[in-house]
Image: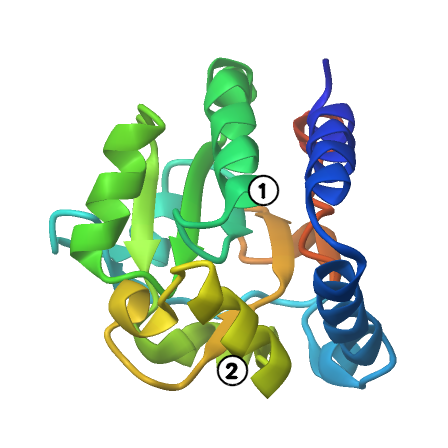
Amino acid sequence: MSLTQLLKEHAEESAAKYPEEVKAIMQNAIDDLEVSSLTTNALKTGDIFPSFNLPNAKGEVISSLSLLDKGPLVIAFYRGGWCPYCNIELKALQNALPQIKEKGAQLIAISPESPDNSLTTKEKNELSFEVLTDKDNSFARDLSLVYKLPDSLIALYNKFGLSLDESQGNSNSELPIAATYVIDTNGKIMYHFLKEDYKLRADPLAILEVL
């Protein structure tokens, strides 16, 4: 089953569990984000992706330039290990990793989670690719990928026991949208996926086709 199908199946199962008022809060947040101009300035296919130096789950700094010296790079931004859609995406990317490597490319994931929480996410999903921490969403913000959660959604997450403060180590209540990039060795973006709806993610099949 493709990632797109897995996400759709999970979304349908989740929707069946939640009362209408909960679904309305979630959908309204997505709708507001979709009509915003958040991604207007986001990088897209043909643009040059900026270099970065970010810590991995062990606190070691990873350089994008060093990675690109070895081949093309697939970068997936995700919200955190607390997000079931992110975990489904990360597992699908892990399953596709051998094929990505066969294409001569590398894969990394970036989130605002602290390194400790990133390590938990990596171990939970048995990931063998690097999971990097973008502290306070600083890098993602420069890419126009970050939004602040509405108060109604923050309250709902708190009710569910989901604390972004604990996940990220700040009280900003900000997250990156679902974004995936494929970058060639010159830093040029060959493929981009930008969606305000967190239930949608770039399918590894599309990534492999680009590679």
- Between residue 135 and residue 24, name the one nearer to us: 24
> Does residue 70 sit above or below 143 in this rendering?
above
Task: Please tell me whether mark 1 sits on a helix, a strand or a loop.
Answer: helix
Q: Position of residue 192 (x, y in %)?
A: 72, 53
- Between residue 88 and residue 42, name the one nearer to us: 88
Q: Position of residue 177 (x, y in %)?
A: 62, 65
Q: Residue at x 49, y 49 (%)?
A: 83
Residue 16 picture quarter: top right
Task: Please tell me whether mark 2 sits on a helix, a strand or a loop.
Answer: helix
Residue 104 seen by the camera:
no
> From the viewer's perspective, is 146 left or right of 26?
left
- Between residue 51 and residue 60, name the one nearer to us: 60
> Does residue 90 sit above or below 184 in this rendering?
above
Residue 49 picture quarter: bottom right
Q: Position of residue 164 (x, y in %)?
A: 37, 69
Q: Position of residue 27 (x, y in %)?
A: 79, 65
Q: Alpha-carbon distance for marks 2 and 1?
A: 24 Å
Q: Residue at x 53, y 48 (%)?
A: 76
**Mark 1 neighbour class, 10 Å CA radius: few under 14, some 14 to 19, many 20 or more:** many
- Please name the residue that numbered disc 2 is placed on: 142
Q: Are marks 2 and 1 in contact (CB under 8 Å)?
A: no
Q: Amino acid at mark 1?
A: Tyr
Residue 191 seen by the camera:
yes
Q: Amino acid at mark 2?
A: Asp
- Please name the residue that numbered disc 1 is placed on: 85
**Mark 2 neighbour class, 10 Å CA radius: few under 14, some 14 to 19, many 20 or more:** few
Q: Residue at x 51, y 15 (%)?
A: 102
**Quadrant where the C terminus lies?**
top right
Is tag 2's residue or tag 1's residue first in the polypeptide sequence?
A: 1
Residue 137 picture quarter: bottom left
